[in-house]
Amino acid sequence: MSRAGIAAQEDLGPLLELVREDLVRSPGAVDVPRIVRVLGRQGRVLGAAATLELTARIRDHVDGLGPLQSLVAPDVTDLLVNDDGTVWVDGAEGLHRTAVRLGPAQARDLAVRLATVGGRRLDDAMPWADAHLPSGIRFHAVLPPLSPGGAILSLRLPSARRLDLADLEELGALVPEAREALRAIIAARVPFLITGGTGTGKSTLLAAMLGQAPAGERIVVVEDVLELAVEHPHVVHLQARHANSEGAGAVDLTALVRQSLRMRPDRIVLGECRGGEIRELLQALNTGHDGGCGTVHANTAADVPARLEALGALGGLDRAALASQVASALEVVIHLGRRDGRRALEEVAVLRRGSDGLLETATALRVQEGRLEEGPAAESLARRLAGSPSPLTRTASAPRAAPAVRTARAARTQRRRPA
């Protein structure tokens, strides 16, 4: 009998209540002996196979994602429960609806339980919650009356494995020359922002790039909710804290960025810039902490200056002050997009001040039909990464090499030179 078969044959509600009561009396794991003991109190006896299946099902409801657990798969990145109870999955094939449907009480119970597991309060007085679960899942929920129907749940699942730049190239998110350019950005300690819309893979790419940082560097990551999983031997995470039920005890990203300055960082990373904390990050990057980075939501690389101006206004910076700070603190924008369900690098741009003194972006590299093409700021990026102008001569018959290729060639030539 499958888990679905057990669920169809009986209502697990009464049994779940008995199991939870048993856990209160005798804390521990949800295992076969516990389920057998609880079933015995009901005067029920099941065969070995059925008991194993029922134990797994109960464990999903007590420790896992309950009715959503069966939807978890290696390629699934998001599980979404709408207020009408429909469940949607986002993964390699894009966003699609599943056959699973939750009732209002079922969705609310799941939301409240997951919020509690993540150390957050979720009830009528506090009808929304944002948490990081012990399993690594990022959880968000909204209860009625803020949602017109039932509870709304959004679950961002961690990748089954930590992806590096080579993995992203294999998945089609990067072309080979772009991968070399991103490595060069890290090696040259260029401060950068990764931009894109929701679900375009900003955090995944940021973690992969930080994994290329030298092992001797200390990376301090500041996030609202823990999300960045960096494959590096020396990473320290700081997580913001929400206010308690009395409205006290909150610690925001601005305070954490200030604290990070006292932690001897080689690189300061702001997981997501979405408020006035951008002022603290810019000040940090302007005080000798080069190589810093973060992510920002933006539709295109060209929209980044306007987005930064909006964030700067929240931190009390006018357009001129922000442009002055950004000009010496951030240099590169790496923009991601999503087409036909696939996440991929679209553009690498240079942040600079225009003739009017305000911020603007200029395209250095752009991915077109699977090829990396140069833009107006290509030479500027090449000089910044390689440390010198391109030695290659443009000819009408030979296409100009992308800066990443020229940088890689220069690096190989440098390694071949005798000491």
Image (tube, rainbow, N blue to C red):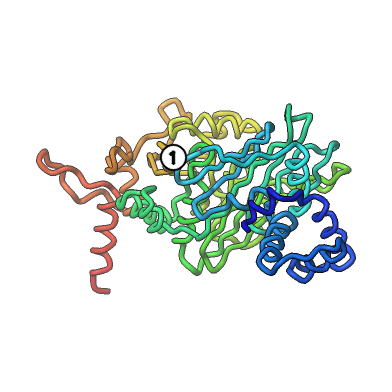
Q: Quadrant of the C terminus?
A: bottom left
Residue 182 falls left or right of residue 67: left
Work out which residue is located at the far left of the displayed protein and give it: 397
Name the residue carrying label 1. 341
The one nearer the camera, 373 or 88, is 88
The one nearer the camera, 371 or 96, is 96
What is the secondary structure assignment of the residue under circle 1?
loop
Relative to residue 167, is residue 101 depicted above or below?
above
Residue displayed at 90% across by 65% down: 25
Work out which residue is located at the far bottom of the displayed protein and give it: 419
Q: Position of residue 324 (x, y in %)?
A: 52, 36
The one nearer the camera, 246 or 107, is 107
Relative to residue 321, is residue 220 depicted above or below?
below
Residue 109 falls left or right of residue 352: right
Q: Amino acid at mark 1?
A: Gly
The one nearer the camera, 69 or 382, is 69
Mark count: 1
Q: Is residue 135 visible?
A: yes
Residue 163 falls left or right of residue 50: left
Q: Position of residue 336 (x, y in %)?
A: 44, 41
Residue displayed at 78% across by 32% down: 144
Residue displayed at 59% across by 46% down: 281
Disc 1 crowd, CA 10 A, few/some/many (<14, 14-19, 20+): some
Q: Position of residue 251 (x, y in %)?
A: 75, 48
Residue displayed at 44% across by 39% down: 341
Q: Quadrant of the N terminus?
A: bottom right
Q: Is residue 353 visible?
A: no
- Can you tell which quarter of the image residue 259 is in? bottom right
Residue 23 falls left or right of residue 344: right
Q: Position of residue 96 (x, y in %)?
A: 52, 38
